[in-house]
Image: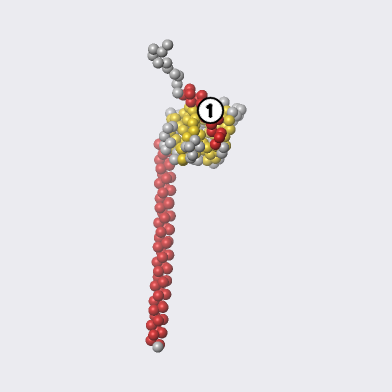
Amino acid sequence: MSHIITAQLIVLADENIERKSAEVTDWAARIGWTVGLLLLVALVYWLMREGWKWRGSLQGDLPELPAPPQTPGDARLRLTGRYHGSTTAGQWLDRIVAHGLGARSRAELTLTAEGITVERTGAPDFLIPAGRVRGARLDKGIAGKVLTEGGLLVITWEHGDRLLDSGFRSDRAEEHAAWVQALQPASTAAAGPHTPEEGAA
């Protein structure tokens, strides 16, 4: 009888040892996966940061952004919402990051005779001079950000030797149409004068 009890105790002890060993192995595997995941996240972040710096160096020829006027004129339109980024005009994935243009942020736009003042939270303010505005349109995406159809106000403007698209979304999307209408004359002027066809009366 004592031999049977001893054998059972040995079996129970072996099972307990195996269970503890499995628990240790399981924790080691979890720690290994966690460390691996953290390293992967760190690598992705580093690659993104280096890519951002590389893109910024390629855009080193872009001049400093015009500063908003100290005494702005009367406001024709105002818009409060978000700034979603800027790209090379017509290329919605060619993001501009120089001089803080790559930073998405809350923004307030004010249209005056001087141009469009862009005041941002946590990023530099700037002015789009009236003479540099080339038009505006409704769109759905910019700088990799996709919204609903017509949910984005895209203003096209000239800065240095580049033509840029800057995307904004108002807290009240119905305001977008008024901005497109207000900036339409600049867009029409940028298209150039109409040349009559030869032979026209």
Name the image quarter holding residue 89: top left
Closer to the camera, 141 or 148?
A: 148
Residue at 54% over, 40% down: 106
Circle 1 packing at 10 Å, graded few (<14), some (14-19), many (20+), is few
Does the rendering let one see residue 119? Answer: no
Q: Left or right: where does residue 2 sit relative to residue 110? A: left
Name the image quarter holding residue 179: top right
Closer to the camera, 120 or 149?
A: 149
Residue 34 spot, x, y in % from top left: 43, 58
**Secondary structure type for disc 1:** helix
Residue at 39% over, 72% down: 18
Furthest-bottom residue in this view: 1
Q: Quadrant of the N terminus?
A: bottom left
Label 1 belongs to which residue? 181
Tell me if residue 193 comes above or below residue 31 in the rendering. Answer: above
- Number of numbered discs visible in the structure rendering: 1
Tell me if residue 5 comes above or below residue 123 in the rendering. Answer: below
Tell me if residue 193 comes above or below residue 82 in the rendering. Answer: above
Closer to the camera, 110 or 5?
A: 5
Residue 183 spot, x, y in % from top left: 52, 27
Residue 107 spot, x, y in % from top left: 55, 38
Q: Amino acid at mark 1?
A: Gln
Residue 155 spot, x, y in % from top left: 49, 31
Does the rendering let one see residue 21? Answer: yes
Residue at 44% over, 18% down: 194
Q: Quadrant of the C terminus?
A: top left
